[in-house]
Image: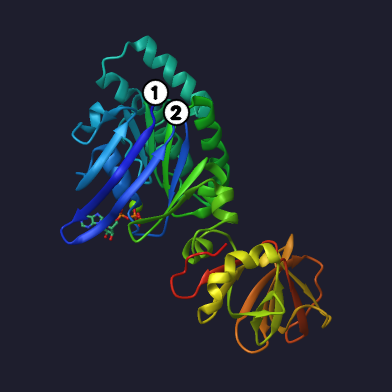
Amino acid sequence: MASVTITNVWKYYGKTVAVKDLNITCNDGEFVSVLGPSGCGKSSTLRMLAGLEHISAGDIHFGDTRVNDLEPKDRDIAMVFENYALYPHKTVYENMANPLRLRNESEETIKKRIAFAAEMLEIEHLLQRKPMELSGGQKQRTAIGRAIVREPKLFLFDEPIAHLDAKLRARMRGELKIMQRRLGTTMIYVTHDQLEAMSMADRIAVMNNGVLQQFGTPQEIYNHPVNEWVAGFVGEPPMNFIDCDLIEEGGSFYAVHSAFKVAVPSDQAVKLRGALKSSGVRMGIRPDQLAISLGQDGAAKGSIKITEPLGGDTLVDVDLKGANHVLVKTDADFRGQMNDPCSLNFDTSRWHFFSKETGVAYF
Ligand SMILES: Nc1ncnc2c1ncn2[C@@H]1O[C@H](COP(=O)(O)OP(=O)(O)OP(=O)(O)O)[C@@H](O)[C@H]1O
Ligand SMILES: [Mg+2]
């Protein structure tokens, strides 16, 4: 097992800067997810960890060992990619045995480790099949099995379940998490899917444009995003953003918009004092932190644009008076119809405010 320390790491491809001054520390046995949109530098980071890509600047340590100049085979890692690259002419058993044979492990060790991995991944009945006789999910399990049998210090997974169907993906999320906890092997897991990162990782490194935006537990990232970009990227349906004016009246702060004027709790006002002088703030609130009613007694007035019943709950798209529309998540038995007037209340204990200029969160 190993901790992983990424210190001031940069990756250039010619003039393209793929990773900018990255700093991440992953504890021994921790499951860290690298999350971000396409092209943000996730795979470049993982490939530098694996030794498949030269590090343009900075250092990577596994435990106390600086690995910058170590060959991939000397790093004691196992990688799984989205395209799992199984040998088509070898059986599942032989595919899994392959890395161990290359290391001259005994047949007894090979058999024991494959039995252990196959049981964990529930592929014991498939060991004599060839890849073309497997479903996508079974191929994926085989590739993961091949990583497990190596008993590496570090797992590096790059979108390993991205192309599976939604149901299988949901199941694999749980299984991969159980597997990693059971083995206790440090895991760095790249994904663009925030649900995957949120549901599996101990901590998430959120990247955008090659820059680490925030590194924290799923709860920290969801409940205390450091900026507007993270707030908007994590959470489904996404956070609503509403530009407001911030005013001070009789010692209290208010968020003011053409559709509402809502008092800011006093403990939050302290953090917003600096924003008073700016030309407005951007409020962020998640769809389930808004309460909708068909009466007019709520804080913000508007009308229903469309409702989307989702079975367990209903999404309501609301046009606020003036500008803006917001998404509200409410009960399945909500009876509002298109164009009905409605009003909203804000859960002011959970909303956020961001600088309109920089996107940085006040809280
Ligand atoms: N071999 C390469 N040569 C030149 N540019 C590259 C190379 N590999 C990646 N890039 C560029 O570096 C940036 C980061 O790419 P990277 O593959 O790390 O992104 P990613 O976050 O893994 O994206 P995705 O989710 O699409 O896999 C992108 O702008 C990409 O075009
Ligand atoms: Mg990638």
- Pick the front one: 130 or 194: 194
Judged from this view, the residue extending furthest toward the bottom is 322
Q: Position of residue 264 (x, y in %)?
A: 68, 71
- In the rendered structure, the answer to whether residue 326 lies left or right of residue 336 reads left
Q: Earlier in the sequence, mark 2 or mark 1?
A: 1
Amino acid type indicated by mark 2: Thr
Q: CA distance from mark 2 to mark 1?
A: 8 Å
Residue 185 numbered tag: 2
- In the rendered structure, the answer to whether residue 296 lies left or right of residue 316 reads right
Q: Position of residue 295 (x, y in %)?
A: 84, 81
Amino acid type indicated by mark 1: Glu
- Pick the front one: 78 or 285: 285
Query: Does residue 176 sit above or below 325 in this rendering?
Result: above
Q: Is residue 224 visible?
A: yes
Q: Where the N terminus falls, by quadrant?
A: top left
Q: Where the C terminus falls, by quadrant?
A: bottom right
The residue at which mark 1 appears reads as 151
